[in-house]
């Protein structure tokens, strides 16, 4: 069972940023990317392999402060 996570992400401005966020997310075990755009990301993750906090931290460590968004866009 995969959980869905929608992220609001600060500091993204171009395709390079999208690539950096995609790379950071793809490096995480148990994460399946649905979409990454400037300022947001949608993904699914396996809660037995990773946690939402871990995902947020990985994006922040790539240089883009992220928070979970309450609702999908
Ligand atoms: Cu950029």
Image: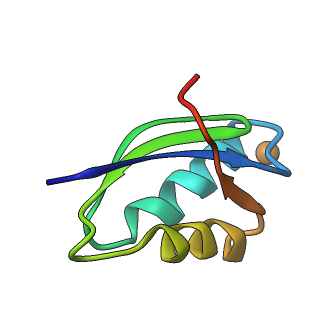
Q: Residue at x 68, y 70 (%)?
A: 62
What percent of the width, then of the height, locates residue 5? 45, 48
Give the farthest residue toward the left.
1
Q: Residue at x 83, y 39 (%)?
A: 13
| Number of dots carrying numbers | 0
Closest to the observer, 22 or 9? 9
Which of the pair 3/11 is nearer the observer?
Answer: 3
Looking at the image, which residue sits at the far front?
70
Question: Which percent across, then down, holds residue 58?
Answer: 57, 73
Relative to 50, say whether 32 is above or below.
above
The extreme top residue here reads: 73
Q: Is residue 26 left or right of residue 23?
A: left
How far across and down, in percent of the image, does residue 57 sit?
Answer: 62, 76
Asked if residue 35 is positioned above or below residue 65 in the image, the reply reads: above
Residue 37, image x, y percentages: 62, 32
Q: Nearest the camera: 69 or 25?
A: 69
Residue 69 to residue 72: above or below: below
Residue at (40% x, 45% y) in the render = 43
Among the 4 quarters of the image, the one containing residue 41: top right
Query: Residue at (59%, 55%) from the top-left corner?
Result: 21
**Left or right: where does residue 36 sit relative to residue 49?**
right
């Amino acid at each position: 069972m995969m959980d869905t996570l929608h992220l609001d992400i600060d500091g993204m401005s171009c395709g390079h940023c999208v690539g950096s966020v995609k790379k950071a997310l793809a490096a995480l075990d148990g994460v399946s990317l649905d979409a990454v755009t400037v300022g947001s990301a949608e993904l699914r993750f396996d809660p037995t392999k990773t946690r939402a906090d871990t995902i947020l931290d990985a994006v922040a460590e790539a240089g883009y402060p992220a928070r979970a968004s309450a609702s999908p866009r």
